[in-house]
Image (cartoon, grey):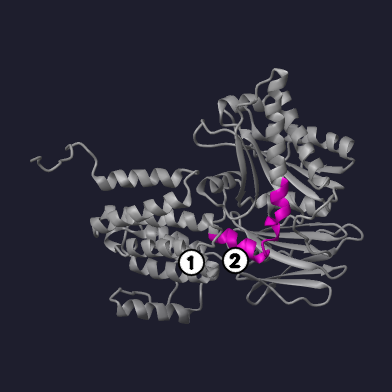
Amino acid sequence: MRGPWRRSPDAAPPSLEILDEGTRLLANPDADAVALRAFADKLATAAASEGGTARGVSLGTLAGELRLRVFRASSGSSEPDARAALAAFATAGKRVDLEACRPARLFAELSGEIAHDPGVTYQELYVARRRFHAAPCVDELEQALVRASPFRPPPTVLEQLDRALTAEGVPIEDAGIAPPKSEARPRVSRLSRWTTGDTARVVIELDRAAAYALEPASGGGVRLRIDGAELPSLAAGGSEPTLEPSPPKSLLLGGGLAKTEGGLVLTLSLARPAYRRVFFLPDPFRIVVDLGTQPPVFGVASGPRPLRRVVVDPGHGGADPGAIGPTGLREKDVTIAIAKMVGPILARELGVEVRLTRGSDAFVSLEERAAVGNAFEADVFVSIHCNAAETKARRGIETYVLDTARDELAHRVAKRENGGGAASHGELRAILDDLKIAEVGARSHHLATLLQKATMSSLHAAEEKGVSYGDVLDGGVHGAGFFVLVGARMPAVLMEVSFISNPVEEGYLAKTDYRARVADAIVNALRAYRDGK
C-alpha cells in the first residue's frame, strides 16, 4: 500500500500557490466571468481552511476582488457578485490583529458604490477606522476618510455609530468626533469659463474635495453652493473673483464667486434659459458646470448623420509629453502630427470644418478640450493618443468611449491619460449617474467601432504595397473613465493608436507612412459615420 503523499520541503504551501494563481488571474484582461467566479469560490474555500490567519485574510480579500471585477464588468448589473464580494471583504476585514485594513476599505467603498451613496462609504470607513485605530495599517483608512470627508454625515449620526461600537467593546476615546478630516478648508485655485452663443462651461478648481449643490433654476441665472470652501484672495484682503467678460451674443453673460455664511456661492448670469449639468472631476478636484440651450440627443439614428464640424484632440502637449518610447519618441509629437494630417483631409474630402484643441506644442487642460468641442458645436469629438504599458510586449490598436472602467487594464490606461489621476469606480459611476450617462450613448460606441475597423483595415492593407503592418493587433473597443470625454455634448471617442512602449510599434509610430494610414482611417470612419453605415 502506498504511503501518504508528502510535499517537498521546499515546495510552496497549496494556499500560496492558489494565491499566486489568483493574483495572475485578476491581472489577466482576458479572464471571463465564469473563470473569475470559479476561482473566487476556490479562494474562499482556501481562506476558510486557513482560519483566522494572515494568509486567510489575503485569500479572502483576493476572492472578493475577483467577484468585484465580475460585478464591474457587468456595469453594475450582477448584484450576486457584488454581494459575494461584500461578504468576502467583510469576513477578511474582521481581523484587526492581522492588519486587515485593505479588505475593510474595499468593503466600505463597495457598500457606497452599491448604494450609489458616498455617505455610506464614509460611515463604513468611519467604523473601520475606529476598529483599526491601533493597527499599523490605519493610515490607509485615514487617507480614505480624508478623501470622503465632503460626504461626512452630521455629528449625531457619528455619535450613533460610536454608541454601537462601544456596545461591541470597541474603545472610543473621542466619541462623536469625526476623525480624521482635512485640517484646511477647500480653497479655490482657479475659476475659468468657455462660452459660445449656445453653450458654456465653467470650471472651479479647488485644492481638495468639497461638497456642492446646485440651487433650483430661477430666471436667467445659475447658483451653485460650495460648502466650506474659501477664496485665498479674500483671506489676503483681496476682492471676490469674477469671470472674464464673455464675447458678444454669448450664452454666458458673466458671473463670479462670493463668500457666504457656509462657504462660497457661484452665480452665473445667462442670456436665455439653458439646460444645466454639474459634475466633478477628481485629482485635482474640479467642479464643472455645463450649460446648453439644446439637450444632448443620443442614440444610433438610421440613415445619413449630420457631420458639419469635427474636433480633433491631439493628446498631451507642452510640459506634458505623454508616454515616451524606448528610444525617446514622445506621445505628444505623434498625436499632433496625426491630427495635422487629419484636418486638411477632412476639410478637402468631406467638406467639414475642423478644429484642433491644440495646433502647437502647448498644454491644454483636460476639461478645456471637451469645452472646445462644445463651444465649436462639433458633431464629433476624436481624441488621439498613444498607448503604453508596464510590459513592453503589449501592442495593438484600441479605441475607447466614456464608461465605468470594465477591467483593471482599462482603468490603468485611463489613469495614465488622465495625467495620473483617476476616479475610483464609485466616483466615476457617480459622475455618469449625474450626467444620466448621456455621454456613453450608442452613437459614441458606434463611432468607436467604425474607427477601430477602419484603422485595422488601413494598416493591414499596407502589406499589399510592400509595407508590413500586418502584425498590428486589433485591441477592440472598450469603456474607461477618460476625463477628456466627460461633458462632451456630441459622440466622443479616444483612440490609442499603438503602444509607444513597444519597441516595434514605437518604430511604426515614428514613420510618416504609418501616421498617414491612421489619419486616412479616421477620415474613412467619419465618412462611414456620416453616410449612416
Q: Position of residue 493 (x, y in %)?
A: 70, 47
The three-letter amino acid code for the residue at tag 2 is Ala
Q: Main secondary structure of the magenta part?
A: helix
Label 1: few (<14), some (14–19) or many (≥20) C-alpha neighbours in 10 Å: some
Q: Which residue is mark 2?
A: 210
Residue nearer the viewer, 272 or 130: 272
> Which x, y percent locates residue 525?
76, 40
Separation of disc 1 and disc 2 at Cα? Answer: 12 Å
Q: Specify start and end residues of the magenta stretch as a single range.
A: 426-447
Q: Is 158 above or below relative to 48?
A: below
Question: Regarding mark 1 in the picture, which secondary structure is present there?
Answer: loop
Asked whether residue 145 is in view, the answer is no
Q: Nearer the viewer, residue 321 or 498?
A: 498
Q: Quadrant of residue 251?
A: bottom right
| Quadrant, the C terminus | top right
Find disc 1 in the rendering and name its residue. Answer: 181
Farthest residue in the left direction? 1
Q: Quadrant of residue 267?
A: bottom right
Q: Residue at x 37, y 61 (%)?
A: 88
Residue found at x 24% / y 60%: 52
